[in-house]
Image (spheres, rainbow, N blue to C red):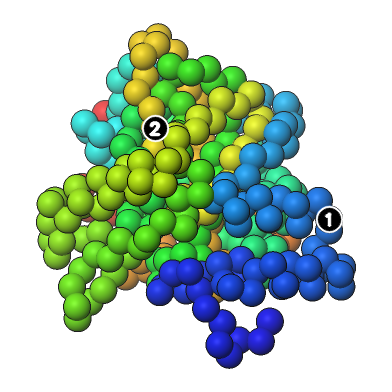
Amino acid sequence: MQTEDIKYHSRFGGNWIDTDRFAEELAARVSDGRISDELAEQIAIFERDGYVIMRGIVPEELLTAIDDEVESAWEPGSGFLGRNPKLGLKWAHQFPADGRRRIVDPIVNAPSAQLAAFVPEIRDFLEAIFDETPMAFQSLFFERGSQQRIHQDTAYVVTNAPVRLAAAWIALEDVEEGNGELVYYPGSHRFDEFLFGNEDDVSKSWNIGRDGQPMHQEFLAGLDNQAAERGIEKARFLPKRGDVLLWHADLAHGGSKQTNEEATRRSIVVHYTPLSTEPNYVNFTSHFKPYEVAPGAYMSSRHYDPYLLDSEERPVIPIDGLGLDPFEG
Ligand SMILES: O=C(O)CCC(=O)C(=O)O
């Protein structure tokens, strides 16, 4: 693509799909065989709506293996890290089994989750929109829904190329309305852009010290307001096990209220960026080492050193407040 005079929807740039040349560029890539017709259709939907749903792309053998890996994650010594809103970050076995546990970066220690993050449909799609090898760099396993207010990931998932980001929501079980399902505003990736920071330091990401809570609330309210002004209704993702929803960096999405108290809503969310992009955590971890998990597929982690997967050791996390002993009580 000729780079002069190209206009991006965002002042922070993006991928080629985020430019005013999208339609002609897509046609050119299809016509010279770089992109298949099927992939082109998915990319066109993603560009228009800010997300695309791929049904049944994670095979059942992989899903069964993930179930086992997640079960083993709660055992002392598993090496998995967990998180919940109350207790923060700890070894996974240190969390009560109340159904609200989350596993941090499950794709590092769980080989099947890693494969699921890069099933060919996801890998090829990401490579096509990034025009580059994809890298998974922030993932979470959820037992139940986050119930998180509708937001854009660019506010919190920080890299040096903010719009060159996409995420996958991988369903590990069927989800019904009331189970804390994922909700989103179709088309919201093209909403007017909220600017954090100040004149000297305009930013797409929220920094609590610099911006404070009022600006954060203004950002969140702005998403609902823009949806209302444009007459956009919330859509719900009610997947079957093995379905995946891929979303754009700026799709406004969140977790709906869980009205069915008993229900779990097991899922894995993976964030991706091109291999040349640097997550913000390169500035405060020694673990930024992209690791090739399969040809054309990389991962990195803020907490784990994936290269330890090649050794006999379990990945360990020498970060503040957490010891190195994955058996600690
Ligand atoms: O799955 C959910 O409830 C929401 C997940 C989400 O918003 C995220 O990971 O960015």
Circle 2: element type = strand
Q: How many marks?
A: 2
- Tell me: 316 left or right of 213: right
Question: Gap between marks 1 and 2, in whole Å?
Answer: 33 Å
Q: Is mark 2 within 8 Å of ligand 1?
A: yes
What mark, if any, has residue 224 been given in the picture? none
Who comes first in sequence, dot 1 or dot 2?
1
Which of these two is toward me, 17 or 129? 17
* Percent position of residue 246, x then y: 58, 46
Name the spot of residue 202 as percent of width and height, x first.
26, 73
Q: Front-most of 200 and 165?
A: 200
| Residue at which label 2 appears | 255
Amino acid bearing label 2: Gly
The structure residue drawn at horizontal position 54% and vertical position 21%, both measured from the top left corner, is 175
Which residue is the extreme one toward the bottom? 4
Check if mark 1's residue and mark 2's residue have beta carbons within 8 Å.
no
| Displayed quadrant of residue 242 | top right
Residue at image location 41% in from the left, 73% down from the top? 12
Q: Is residue 5 visible?
A: yes
Nearer the camera: disc 1 or disc 2: 1
Left or right side of 56 for 258: left
Q: Circle 1 sits on which residue?
A: 37
Question: Is 201 rendered above or below residue 221?
Answer: below
Q: Is residue 194 above or below residue 267?
A: below
- Across and down, in percent, residue 68 comes to 59, 24
* Residue 292 image offset from top left, x and y in percent: 63, 61
Asked whether residue 151 is in view, the answer is no
